[in-house]
Image (spheres, helix red, strand yellow):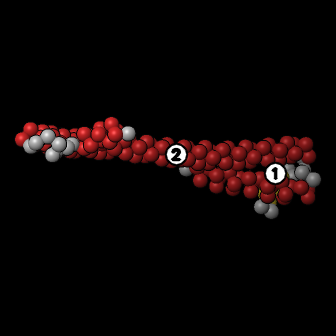
């Protein structure tokens, strides 16, 4: 629709330009368009008629270009809005995926910590039982080796 209005405005501007060019040689006593004499209003009236036609052509062209620019601006705003919306959706999806991954990893890590804690407790109990059964000084825990080294210094 905007393209049609722009084409009509260009056509009207062309017709007006041809009318002004065609009327100029006669001293603007007669109006001529496309090589034919259209009217003979006289000198001052012909000038006013040509001025009005030129003004209407300029306004129609300016209005058509403005409508085209408004349409282009609207399309650009719509495209930018769609891009921002898609980016926002992707950011939100990434956040949800990250949260789900962290939740899953937290459960796995908690299970691993529980397993390792149980194994450590079993080993500590086993070492404690071995210490009670063996003569003193035969089985040493790593903490006691470090303490002995610290006492020697």
At horizontal 91% and vertical 46% (from top left) the residue drawn is: 43
Would residue 134 appear left or right of 6 to someone viewing this image?
A: left
Q: Is residue 81 visible?
A: yes
Could you classify mark 2 by the number of other residues whose Cα lies within 10 Å: few (under 14), some (14-19), or many (20 or more)? few
Query: Could you tell whether 55 is left or right of 4 in the image?
Result: right
Q: Which residue is pictured at 85% across the width and 42% down the height?
A: 48
Residue 55 position, x and y percent, is 78, 44
* Res. 112 mark: none
Q: Secondary structure at mark 1?
A: strand
State which quadrant residue 131 falls in: top left
| Lateral position of residue 48 relative to residue 58, left or right | right
Could you tell me if residue 129 is visible in this image?
A: no
Residue at 10% over, 42% down: 135
Crowd around label 1: few <14 · some 14–19 · many ≥20 (10 Å): few
- The x and y percentages for residue 103 are 27, 40
Cα separation between marks 2 and 1 = 53 Å
Number of residue marks: 2
> Which comes sooner in the sequence, label 2 or label 1?
1
Position in image of residue 28 (x %, y %): 89, 51
Secondary structure beneath dot 2 equals helix
Would you name the residue on which mark 1 appears? 39
* Residue 143, above or below 33: above
Q: Quadrant of the C terminus?
A: top left
The single residue placed furthest to the front in the displayed view is 152
* Percent position of residue 93, x then y: 35, 44
**Residue 80 numbered tag:** 2
Decide if residue 81 is on the left or right side of residue 9: left
């Amino acid at each position: 629709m905007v393209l049609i209005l722009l084409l009509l405005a260009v056509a009207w501007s062309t017709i007006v330009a041809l009318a002004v060019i065609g009327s100029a040689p006669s001293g603007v006593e007669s109006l001529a368009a496309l090589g034919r004499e259209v009217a003979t209003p006289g000198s001052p009236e012909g000038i006013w008629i040509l001025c009005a036609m030129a003004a209407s052509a300029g306004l129609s062209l300016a209005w058509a270009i403005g409508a085209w620019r408004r349409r282009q601006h609207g399309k650009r705003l719509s495209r930018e809005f769609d891009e921002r919306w898609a980016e926002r959706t992707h950011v939100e999806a990434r956040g949800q995926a990250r949260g789900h991954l962290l939740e899953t990893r937290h459960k796995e890590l908690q299970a691993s910590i529980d397993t390792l804690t149980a194994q450590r407790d079993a080993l500590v109990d086993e070492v404690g039982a071995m210490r009670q059964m063996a003569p003193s000084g035969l089985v040493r825990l790593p903490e006691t080796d470090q303490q002995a080294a610290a006492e020697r210094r």
